Amino acid sequence: MADQPTWKEYPVAATIHEPGSATGQNTGDWRSERPVRKQELCDKCGICWIFCPDAALFMNEEGYYEVDLYHCKGCGICVRECGKNAIVMVEEGE
Amino acid sequence: MGERIGLEVSLAVSEAVKLARADAIAAYPITPQTHIVEELAQMVADDDLDAEFIMVESEHSAMSACCGTAAVGARTYTATSSQGLALMHEMLFIAAGLRLPICMTIANRALSAPLSIWGDQSDVMAERDCGWIQLFAETGQEAFDLTLCSFKIAEDKRVLTPTIVNIDGFTLSHVVEPFELESQEDVDAFLPAYEPQTILDPAHPVTIGPVGFPEIYTEIKKQQDMAVIGAYDVVLEVFAEFEKKFGRAYKPVESYRAEDADIIINIAGAVAGTARIAVDRMRDEGKKVGIVRPRLWRPYPFEDMRAAVKGAKGVAVVDRALSVGGPGGPIASELRSCLYPLAEKPVVLSFIAGLGGRDITIEDFYTMVRETEEVLETGYTDEYKMIGVRE
Amino acid sequence: MAENKSAEFIPRLLPPRELVAEGHRGCQGCGEALALRQVFKVAGPNTIVCSATGCMEIITSPYPETAWRIPWIHVAFENAAAVASGVEAGIKILKKKGRYPHDGKINVIAIAGDGGTADIGLQALSGALERGHNFTYVCTDNEAYMNTGIQRSSATPYGASTTTSPKGKDSIGQTTQKKNLPKIVAAHDIPYLATACPSYPLDLMNKTRKALDIEGPTYLHVLSPCPTGWRHDIDMAVEMGRLAVESGVFPLYEVENGKLKMNMVIENRKSVAEYMKPQGRFRHLKPEEIEKVQERVDEHYAELVERAECDA
């Protein structure tokens, strides 16, 4: 606790002034399985993206949806919802 | 220059809120606060007061809505009493913890049960720990003046703490008194528009009211406590500026004939007026008695109280509230704590009087002084005494 | 070729902005977080959120982390609607006096769970709706007090096992019926309310847009499947929402100026049993109990369809 702020250094009422500071949290660490894309099967429909509770998929330059492994919690909704089986879960460590 | 008129104190408080140009009011009616909110509603309806008056469905929602209005930068006001204040209890701590400068009048009234619409101080005394700055008015003029001051104190950048002005229910709220009502121009000069520090604004998205883990909670409470303690200096500044502008001087603690008193009556609120008459009579009879009245209640004015009772042999504290089964009345408890570190201190006796609207008479003050004299002779007999209870 | 086709997929046309940031502490597969993500995509940055205490508040605001990229205030559990009333009224008067720094429309959105809406928050909601504030109330309904450990609420469905309505030797779990919040809200005669589910994102987002654009109080009741509390697999939240709608357990409809409109009328609904099967909270129910639920769902669905036909 030694390097934590003193009472004077906190913003008044502990109001957080940096929007979206949660992005620093490595929720990807929670996973035991992770989604792996099979790009050749993907038709870029965006269903995986709109169904991710953690906004852990993002569109890359080519228009495919990549997994943000820093935040992806490995719930597998994207895998279940993909209509093309273009994304599968694999065990972490494989 | 103000106009001098006779006015019911509740209406004068409303006038002060109007002159302060409150932006938003969220309130729920409860006896004996009703005249304040009714008058404000009429002022808004007549376009005399340019404000949003949210007619909330409970006092809890009143304080909640006040948090909302204050969080977007509106000068915010509400009023309540008794059960209404009790219903707001949860929210009082939150408003203070969120450092929202809401101003509130409490027309002090007894708490149920039994149901009582009549005055005593039990409602606000149950909220000593909530984190609000708290003031007690004795007269109508004071109620008007302190209402104006409360906005300036609460909204000060160094303070940012919600503030209560207490007025005795019925005995002050419903009486007609003479007033110097100040002009809008003069009040505007004394009290400019609220300049909020942090607001909910899409241009600067902030997160207000987060979770405070054990690692930070203590520090945030310390921060809050230091702001309230520091508000003492701001109160002095505001009172000084008020005196300069309007010619009426206020101190955190008022003393009346207390400097050489053997026995001091310690009392808050309007009944100090009756005490003054009793003290004058007793003085005429040769007794050295005086009154010390805390106007500032939170932050507790430690040094002022110690100085005010210095040299006295005994202090008869009159509480219009009781901590049931506890160490007597709240004002007495706090005075004892305040005096504890001193090597020399007067004996402090706790008298409970004026509960649930019962009058405190001149005779009662005679009784309390006499009983204090007896204790000085013979020592303590009771933790506290209830005056006038039929036994 | 594939390039042109994909441009037509509607998710790709949705606003990419994430106003509820990644890195929040929601459970894996949280249906409620998904619902809010979709709502705020529509709402956009000119939005102020008034949140009740609950799952969404806890997971998005552990100091110093906030998932919110828009202004957000949390005050207490039962008063999201009252705080929103204050925010709305405060902005109104400040804009009138030229003292609010932001020009243009601001969405005031109150968010609360079923606990903070149906139970402890019902009074504040009713008051805010009656007063006619211009705001949108979004109830994310995961059918129990999930944040504090899966205790029952009045939105918990009949037969569900929760920690305070547990299944037992002498108990089927929740013995009362789910409180019909949309009906209670509709009784306030507000201009617009709707039920929605994140499994139907376009429907949810269209309704959000509508609710925000309509002047006056509007209400969205959003079913939020919860893997932790409903005890289904963590990849199943979207599927559960779909089954809820397809079985008629959670019909999708709107009530606009008092007129009810079903967003879809399903002829051959899936069975309630199929809906309940993947959920551990219903696992203990005997066929006769499930049949009771089926009868009631059928009855209510028919009532809604009839009412919608009347209002058409």
Image (spheres, helix red, strand yellow):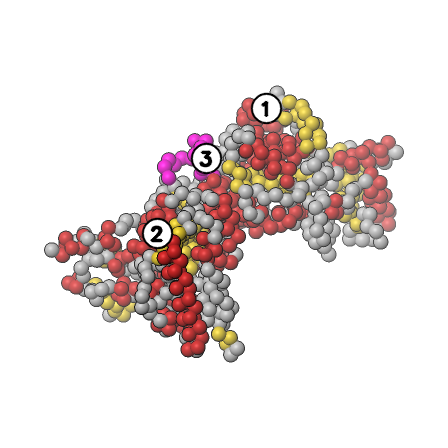
At which x and y percent is residue B203?
37, 40
Where's the N terminus of chain C, which quadrant?
A: bottom left
The chain that hosts pointer 3 is C
Q: x%, y% of residue A55? A: 31, 56
Can residue C224 be spotted in the picture? no
Q: How far is mark 1 from mark 2, CA to CA?
A: 51 Å
Q: Which residue is mark 2?
A: C207
Q: Can the viewer see residue C127?
A: yes
Tell me the residue that label 3 is attached to. Answer: C94
Task: Give SS at disc 1.
Answer: loop
The residue that appears at 71% across and 43% down in the rendered structure is B119
Label drawn at residue A83: none
Residue B183 has which mark? 1
- Above or below, comparing residue C185 to residue C300 in the picture: above
Q: Please tell me how crowded label 2 is: few (under 14), some (14-19), or many (20+) other residues with Cα within 10 Å.
A: many
Q: Residues within 10 Å of mark 1 (few under 14, many from 20)?
A: few
Seen from the viewer's position, the closer of residues B165 and C46 is: C46
Q: Is residue B282 rendered to the left or right of residue C110?
A: right
Q: Which residues are magenta?
A: C90-105
